[in-house]
Structure formats: C-alpha cells, structure tokens
Amino acid sequence: MMPLVWIYWIVSLTIVTYASAYTVKKYRDWGYAALTAFYTIYLGASQILASRAINFDLGFWQFYAPAAVFIYPFIAQAIDMINEVYGRKRTHLTIVIAFHTENCNSSFLA
C-alpha cells in the first residue's frame, strides 16, 4: 500500500509543476495570482497536517514525521517559481499575503 502513496505523491508533484509552468508561460499576468493562491493553499494545508504524525515505511527503514513533509515540496516549488519568474519583491509580497491570510483564518476559526 505504501508504494502507491509515493507514486501518487511523485505524479501529483509532477502534474502541479507542469500545470504551474504552463500557466505562467501562457498567462503571465494571471500566473502570479495562480502561484500565490497555490502557495497560500499549500501553506494552509501544511499547517493543518503538521499536527498529524504519520509512519513513513520505506521498506528498509521506518520513521515517524509530521504529515506536512508531503506538502513541503509543493510549497518550495511554488515560491521558487514565483522568485524565478516574478522576482524578489513579488516573492516577498507573496509571503506577506500568505502570512496575512493564515493569520486572518486562524483568528477567524478561533
């Protein structure tokens, strides 16, 4: 069962990478908004999953880690694409937007 999770993770990361690259290339003006939305959604999901520990069974090695480690490559890929295509200022703006969104959501839910 566990190898299916790894295959699903690799395939989904590949699909998201290609879809993001296509969006940025085809619709450059909309690409920033899309990548910022992806980054914010991934960051929110990682905050939710961070409290859940899961067992990583690699077949030859087992360990426990927060479930958010599955989401981190998506977060890193989104912010890296923003930095590469749109520059440092927009990357900082994206981080501020995500931070503000997370703070608003947490205070709203509390």
Image (cartoon, rainbow, N blue to C red):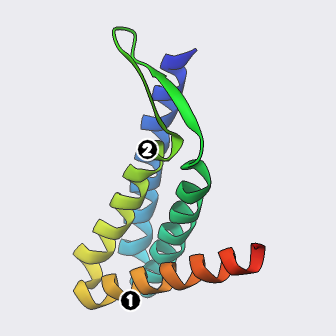
Q: Are marks 2 and 1 in contact (CB under 8 Å)?
A: no
**Quadrant location of the C terminus?**
bottom right
Residue drawn at (49%, 85%) of the image: 97
Residue drawn at (41%, 60%) of the image: 75
For mark 2, give the secondary structure.
helix
Going from the N terminus, do you reach mark 2 or mark 1 first? 2
Given residues 40 and 13, the one toward you in this image is 40
For mark 1, give the secondary structure.
helix
Q: Where in the figure is residue 83, as x and y percent of width and height?
A: 26, 76
Q: In this view, does 27 lie to the left or right of 86?
A: right
Q: Where in the figure is residue 29, as x and y percent of width and height?
A: 43, 88
Density class for disc 1 (Cα within 10 Å; few <14, some 14-19, many ≥20) is few
Mark 2 → mark 1, Cα distance in angstroms:
24 Å
Given residues 17 and 52, the one toward you in this image is 52
The residue carrying mark 1 is 93
- Examine the rendered structure and indicate whether residue 68 appears above or below residue 53: below
- Examine the rendered structure and indicate whether residue 105 appears above or below residue 52: below
Residue 69: give its label: 2
| Amino acid at pointer 1 | Leu
- Of all residues, the one furthest to the right in this rendering is 109
Residue drawn at (52%, 18%) of the image: 2
Residue drawn at (58%, 47%) of the image: 51
- Examine the rendered structure and indicate whether residue 83 appears above or below residue 73: below
Disc 2 or disc 1, which is closer to the eye? Answer: 2
**Quadrant location of the N terminus?**
top right
Given residues 106 and 81, the one toward you in this image is 106
